[in-house]
Amino acid sequence: MADADSVIASCGDLDAVFPMASVTKAVAALAALIAVERRLISLEDPAGPPGSTVRHLLAHASGLPFEGGAAISPPGRRRVYSNRGFEVLGEHIEAATGVGIQEWMEETVLIPLGMSAAAIPGSPADSGEGSVRDLLALGGELLAPTLISADIHAEATSPQFPGISGILPGYGRQRDNAWGLGVEIRDHKNPHWTGVSFSPRAFGHFGQAGSFLWVDPDAGRTGAFLGAKPFGTEHAEAWPALTDAMRAM
């Protein structure tokens, strides 16, 4: 666990490298927001299926399915968690910048944040690997941004297309499945992978590799976990108490 400046408490090897799985999306989202900050793309750029924009893709509201295929919902109607949406986002960034999405993420996020063990060799949705130290550096940036403006950060960590329902992977259907721009927002979801002590403003991401990154702006803390065992029932059951204990340190 860390604040915006340093590691406060840890367990295990902070530099051991594990798959990040879908926590990769938090890196891709920050890279996209940097492109917005530099006016290379806009959140309102058309991207994805008809009627969808970059904002829809980042907020899992484009209607694209989890994997490849045609849209299964009109944009803005349902929260459909989508790896394909982040791959389309990567293609849009490549077209706008002339830089491959993997190189763009490395140059705009990994190198500036000193995420020296991290690599994203394939899909911007789920191919990343890295260390807990890397994730805490990312969490510190999301807690107190230096690569994007306060205004863009505030927008990214506020609910987008509020009130739409959808499945929170691993935790079932949520009537109001709140997401920001590339990060999932705690809000009042039940059940949830973070514990009951967390602020509704807390946000983050977890991955099927058994990985998570959370940021709680009210506590001024960020926490990360990586492991060798894929996400399963034991993770779903243990993480709320684990994250509460981390936040209390």
Image (cartoon, rainbow, N blue to C red):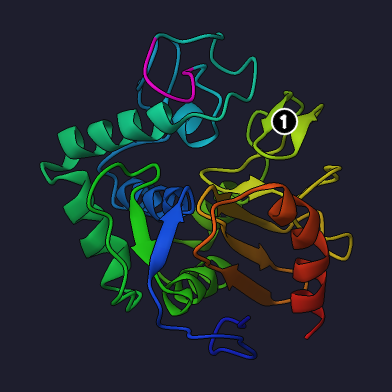
Residue drawn at (45%, 80%), measured in percent from left and top? 133
Measured as percent of width and height from the top left, residue 197 is found at: 88, 66
Residue drawn at (56%, 56%), measured in percent from left and top? 210
- CA neighbours of label 1 inside 10 A, class few (<14), some (14 to 19), many (20+): some
Measured as percent of width and height from the top left, residue 171 is found at: 75, 39
Quadrant, the C terminus: bottom right
Q: Is residue 98 above or below residue 17?
A: above
Q: With 98 as the anchor, is 21 left or right in this view?
A: right
Quadrant, the N terminus: bottom right
Q: Pick whichever, 150 or 215, lies toward us.
A: 215
Q: Amino acid at mark 1?
A: Pro
Q: Main secondary structure of the magenta part?
A: loop
Tell me the quarter of the picture where residue 50 sits: top left
Q: Pick whichever, 26 or 191, lies toward us.
A: 191
Measured as percent of width and height from the top left, residue 120 is found at: 28, 55
Q: Pick whichever, 134 or 183, lies toward us.
A: 134
Q: With 235 as the anchor, is 137 left or right in this view?
A: left
Q: Is residue 87 above or below residue 107?
A: above
For the image, the number of numbered tags is 1
Disc 1 target residue = 162
Q: Is residue 103 above or below residue 198?
A: above
Q: Secondary structure at mark 1?
A: loop
Task: State the extent of the magenta-drawn residues as a range.
Answer: 64-69
Residue 147 magenta: no
Measured as percent of width and height from the top left, residue 115 is found at: 34, 74
Residue drawn at (46%, 61%), measured in percent from left and top? 149
Residue drawn at (70%, 68%), measured in percent from left and top? 217
